[in-house]
Image: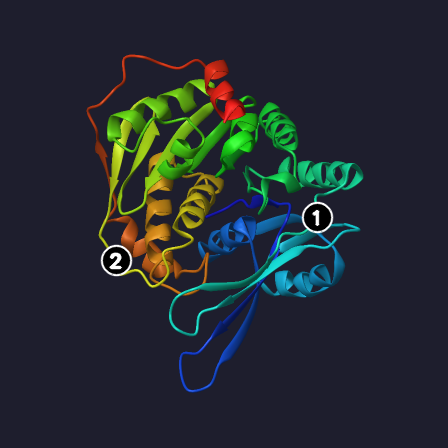
Amino acid sequence: MSGHVMVFAPTPRLTVTVDQPSDQPELHLHPGGQGVWQARMIMSLGVPVVLCTSLGGEIGEVLEPLLLTEGVDLRVVRRDSTSGGYVHDRRDGARHEIVDVVGAPLSRHELDELHNLSLGEGLRAPVSVLSGPNEPSLVPADLYRRFAADLGANGGRVVVDLSGPHLTAVLSSGVYFLKVSHEELIADGLAAGAEEDQLTRAMYDLHAAGAENVVVSRAAEPALALVDGEIFEVEMPRLEAADPRGAGDSMTAGVAAVVAGGGDIRTAIRTGAAAGALNVTRHGLGTGRLDTITGLVDRVRLVPADSRPQERTTPDELADRVVDR
């Protein structure tokens, strides 16, 4: 693969996990958050990453060296308020949240600095991944709209895994690839239910609103993909899950990595599905072996589905659903 990916990760988090695989407990400190997990998987696929982020407070001071050890090309805006983080106890095999520090919203000046920094890096990258904040109120949706518009107008391909107002904001500017879960579509009022025909209708609506290609993950069911105006089921081997979190972020990362290397969107989706499936077999979000992911890609198939909705929702109606929620 060639090229590189810019990952916009406005609010990374410090993750502290207590584990006990043997007689003695262990303490694990890692950088986390959607953008960090996506960047980690993109690099696992052999593609360099420029990570644009904001850091502040004592947590930010700890996060910076941890992010550098990930191997990303780090670009940082210093913020006056603190970054966020959480502590999880996993000693009994399940995750128990001890504390969750969300962090403070970015100021107007910090948002402008982060936008300008990230835009400069995004214009140099063939693909930009816009990851969401760990809490919607920390970064306004309009920043994503502006960012997607500026990148798209200058030939960049924008990849997103967003929901709520942040999703509708980027759709109004247009994106190359959108990944969203069926639970998020239903919660946002964009799909009436989990049945395939209802999700298919929502996918065509998202396409009409500005998403060139769409993937909807469906938990244990095969994901649905809208490519070139056609709906596919993403079929792949089932693997035993060690930690079900992170599959969606790994899928988005796999798509971005392949597209950055000049690959076609169908191969990108198959690679993303393989990366997501492998990630859930491991403890550690956004992790996976390149050789294993490559081996799984050949087992992923895009199978045409035969359901095409007759009624469409206009982009304005789609936005109104989320605003009214």
For label 2, the SS is loop
At 54% from the left and 75% from the top, the residue drawn is: 27
Q: Which residue is mark 2?
A: 239
Residue 109: x and y, percent?
80, 38
Name the residue that disc number 1 marks.
Answer: 104
- Looking at this view, name the residue that lies furthest to the bottom: 23
In this rendering, the answer to whether 56 lies above or below 7 is below
Q: Coloring scheme of the render?
A: rainbow
- Is residue 178 or residue 95 the one in the foreground? 95
Residue drawn at 44 percent across, 13 percent down: 314
Do the residues under discs 1 and 2 have CB atoms within 8 angstroms? no
User: How far across and down, in percent of the image, does residue 17 sit?
Assistant: 52, 69
What residue lies at 72% left-to-right and 43% top-to-bottom?
106
Q: Is residue 247 left or right of residue 235?
A: right
Foreground pick, 33 / 75: 33
Amino acid residing under circle 1: Ala
Measured along the vertical axis of the image, is residue 286 above or below residue 153? Answer: below
